[in-house]
Image (cartoon, grey):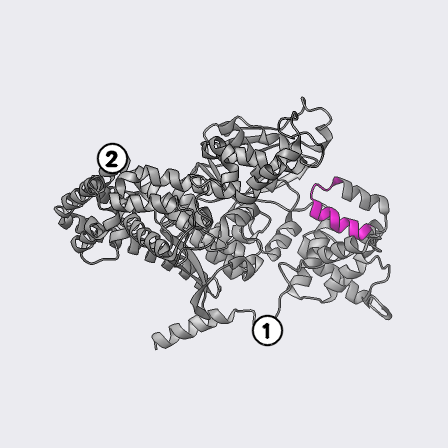
């Protein structure tokens, strides 16, 4: 597909091609617009699916004075409805959560089609339970009301003083036992809106001393009523009355689930004028314990399924423990309660008749989950090991809503999970790990297009290859997916297109070089034959370029790279330093080259460039600024322009940063030539040697 972009950040217009079901590598220097391409595609898909206007965020600043013109445009993505993007936002939002390495790891790693089929098979066999709850909504209502009442007792071993129940009854029931001096307000205190009335009364009390008029009616003398009004706030607390009302309402709703004696005693306690006595508190706690037991039993039955059965060897024995014997809960043992419990127990009996089948399905699902977990653990931990990371992951059981979570472990301390991996991993480690986790999430969601926005440039060579191996060649990988990989790192291209094209051929990779000239973005194919050593490049350019000075630039560099610094090299060095009389050392004019040495060097250079070279003639061209400027102007290659610039301005640019860049580029590129001697420096990681040693021992 040909994707066309217009007016997106630094891209005024551009076109890239994305081959379906292939790895499309787009290589370019920083500032080319790689991230803009990624964002433009992402925003286009969002706008396409949600009718939003995200793409407008990329509008170039020069056009922002007029919101109705020159807006960003993207076309050519008609077949793409979903996209997944690996970038810094993904790392920040989806991985290394405080208690989980990968957000929603259960759904990504385990909850696949096979898992869902297994759960469906199990749920078919236990559907009688869910049907019982669905057909008898009053069971759910009873469970909710019991839970609400249980909360009012608090969670302390005894009856907590901070619980709603204690607060409501600590001073007795002042709704039923109104103080004599406040009986005039009886109708208000007993009304269902009593808490609102009390709040109104207490708010008005703040205005008693402003005037002699009543702040409620303004018609009577306040002195006659002030004592009574103040007595309301002294005896009543609207918040406590609210607790009391709520508990009494809940108790009333549960009347049919308490036996008569229990209910009468609860009402008696709730209407007590003296507050809770110790024996009453003990009675309430006994009720609380039985309510708690019944709630636990009901909730366990309601949640009956794979998670509650998988840890038991005998499903039938486990299901029997779910049955409820209401006879041991005397406070709740009523005909109504027993009738509801009987329905649940009957459903469990029906499941018990199919316990053999259920046992088989549970065992099969256990095996499936275990194999899935072990496979993911093995894949990820193998990657971590051979990429040189001293970490491993574990996938363990978690909460009911997220049954399994991925946890990170350091190999030097396997006794505990790392609670917050972000605090322990380096930038490179986070990116590498996040990239692999991204792959698993993408394989789960299966988007139409996958974008990797400069994913591996921060890693060393060995880690880069380990990641590419995992991403593109593993059993679980991006093979046969449509992938757009943006990078300013040439190494992936060297590995995938040049060195290991045979092992990456299943991925069907292609590579292109992105060029952005004044906002015009184009791409040029990079084939295997385009990837050369600098020696190959120098020899090719020496034989094909037309201008002699350009040939000489590459010849001097070829001598430099191959360390052949003989007469020819010295003569060229003198030429580019604009010395009329060649010498052996730029700072030693006492050691001049002889005419014989110059002729010998000229002859060698002539043979190398396949044309006549004369030092004096070429020197006149070098010092002729007009000639050098002509060469600079006619050159279509920025690299050659930079070399010619260096010749033209021997003193270099006034800016130190530019000067260093020119000098280092003019000589030998550090990235490709300079390196430490591995005989003196340990450039090979120790863990690689360790693995080699293990391999030697095993095969000796």
Q: Nearer the viewer, mark 1 or mark 2?
A: 2
For this view, does 463 lie left or right of residue 156?
Answer: right
Q: Secondary structure at mark 2?
A: loop
**x, y percent for residue 227:** 61, 39
For image coordinates 85% across by 59% down, the residue present is: 579
| Structural crowding at the residue carrying mark 1, measured as other residues with C-alpha within 10 Å and reported as few (<14), some (14–19) or many (≥20) | few
Q: Is residue 338 above or below residue 374?
A: above
- The answer to whether residue 638 is magenta is yes
- The answer to whether residue 240 is magenta is no
Total residue callouts = 2
Name the residue that disc number 2 marks. 136
* Residues under numbered marks 1 and 2 in contact, where contact means CB atoms less than 8 Å apart: no
Name the residue that disc number 1 marks. 681
Question: Furthest-top residue in view?
Answer: 68
Give the magenta range: 634-648
Closer-to-camera residue (668/678): 678
């Amino acid at each position: 597909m040909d994707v066309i972009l217009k007016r997106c950040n630094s891209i005024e217009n551009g076109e890239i091609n994305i081959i379906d079901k292939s790895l499309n590598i787009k290589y370019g220097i920083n500032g080319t617009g790689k991230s803009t391409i990624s964002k433009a595609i992402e925003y286009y898909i969002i706008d396409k699916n949600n009718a939003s206007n995200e793409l407008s965020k990329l509008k170039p600043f020069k056009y922002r004075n007029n919101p109705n013109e020159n807006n960003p445009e993207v076309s050519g993505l008609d077949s793409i409805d979903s996209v997944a993007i690996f970038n810094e936002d993904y790392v920040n939002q989806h991985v290394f959560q405080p208690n989980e390495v990968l957000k929603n790891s259960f759904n990504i790693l385990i909850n696949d089609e096979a898992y869902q089929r297994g759960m469906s098979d199990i749920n078919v066999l236990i559907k009688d339970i869910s049907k019982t709850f669905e057909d008898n909504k009053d069971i759910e209502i009873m469970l909710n009301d019991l839970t609400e009442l249980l909360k009012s007792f608090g969670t302390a071993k005894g009856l907590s003083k901070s619980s709603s129940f204690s607060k409501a009854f600590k001073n007795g029931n002042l709704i039923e036992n109104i103080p004599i001096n406040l009986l005039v307000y009886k109708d208000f205190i007993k009304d269902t809106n009593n808490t609102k009335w009390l709040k109104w009364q207490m708010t008005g009390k703040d205005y008693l001393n402003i005037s002699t008029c009543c702040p409620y009616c303004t018609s009577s003398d306040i002195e006659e009523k002030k004592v009574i009004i103040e007595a309301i706030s002294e005896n009543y607390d609207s918040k406590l009355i609210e607790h009391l009302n709520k508990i009494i309402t809940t108790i009333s709703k549960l009347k049919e689930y308490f036996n008569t004696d229990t209910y009468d005693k609860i009402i008696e306690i709730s209407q007590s004028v003296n507050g809770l006595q110790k024996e009453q508190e003990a009675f309430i706690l006994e009720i609380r314990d039985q309510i708690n037991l019944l709630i636990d039993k009901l909730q366990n039955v309601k949640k009956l399924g794979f998670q509650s059965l998988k840890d038991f060897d005998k499903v039938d024995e486990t299901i029997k423990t779910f049955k409820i014997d209401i006879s041991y809960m005397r406070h709740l043992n009523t005909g109504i309660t027993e009738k509801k419990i009987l329905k649940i127990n009957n459903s469990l009996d029906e499941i018990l008749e199919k316990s053999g089948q259920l046992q088989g399905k549970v065992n099969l699902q256990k095996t499936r989950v275990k194999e899935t977990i072990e496979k993911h653990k093995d894949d990820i931990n193998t990657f971590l090991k051979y990429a040189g990371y001293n970490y491993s992951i574990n996938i363990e059981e978690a909460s009911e809503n997220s049954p399994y979570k991925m946890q990170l472990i350091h190999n030097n301390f396997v006794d505990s999970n790392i609670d917050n991996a972000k605090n322990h991993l380096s930038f490179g480690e986070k990116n590498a790990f996040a990239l692999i986790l991204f792959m698993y999430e993408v394989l789960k969601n299966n988007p139409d297009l996958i974008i990797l926005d400069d994913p591996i440039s921060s890693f060393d060579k060995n880690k880069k290859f380990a990641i590419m191996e995992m991403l593109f060649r593993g059993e679980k990988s991006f093979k046969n997916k449509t992938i757009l990989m943006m990078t300013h790192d040439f190494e992936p291209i060297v590995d995938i297109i040049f060195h290991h094209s045979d092992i990456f051929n299943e991925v069907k990779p292609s590579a292109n070089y992105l060029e952005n000239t004044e906002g015009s973005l184009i791409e040029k194919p990079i084939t295997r034959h385009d990837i050369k050593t600098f020696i190959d490049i120098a020899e090719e350019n020496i034989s094909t370029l037309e201008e002699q000075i350009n040939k000489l630039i590459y010849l001097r560099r070829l001598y430099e790279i191959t360390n052949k610094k003989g007469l020819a090299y010295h003569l060229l060095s003198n030429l580019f330093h604009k010395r009329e009389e060649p010498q052996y050392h730029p700072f030693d004019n006492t050691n001049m080259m002889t005419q014989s040495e110059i002729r010998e060097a000229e002859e060698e250079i002539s043979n190398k460039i396949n044309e006549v070279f004369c030092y004096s003639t070429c020197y006149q061209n070098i010092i002729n600024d007009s000639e050098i400027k002509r060469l600079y102007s006619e050159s279509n290659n920025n690299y050659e322009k930079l070399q010619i610039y260096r010749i033209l301005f021997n003193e270099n640019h006034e800016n130190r940063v530019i000067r260093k860049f020119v000098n280092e580029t003019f000589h030998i590129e550090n990235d490709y030539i300079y390196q430490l001697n591995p005989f003196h420096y340990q450039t090979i990681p120790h863990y690689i040697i360790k693995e080699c040693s293990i391999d030697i021992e095993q095969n000796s």
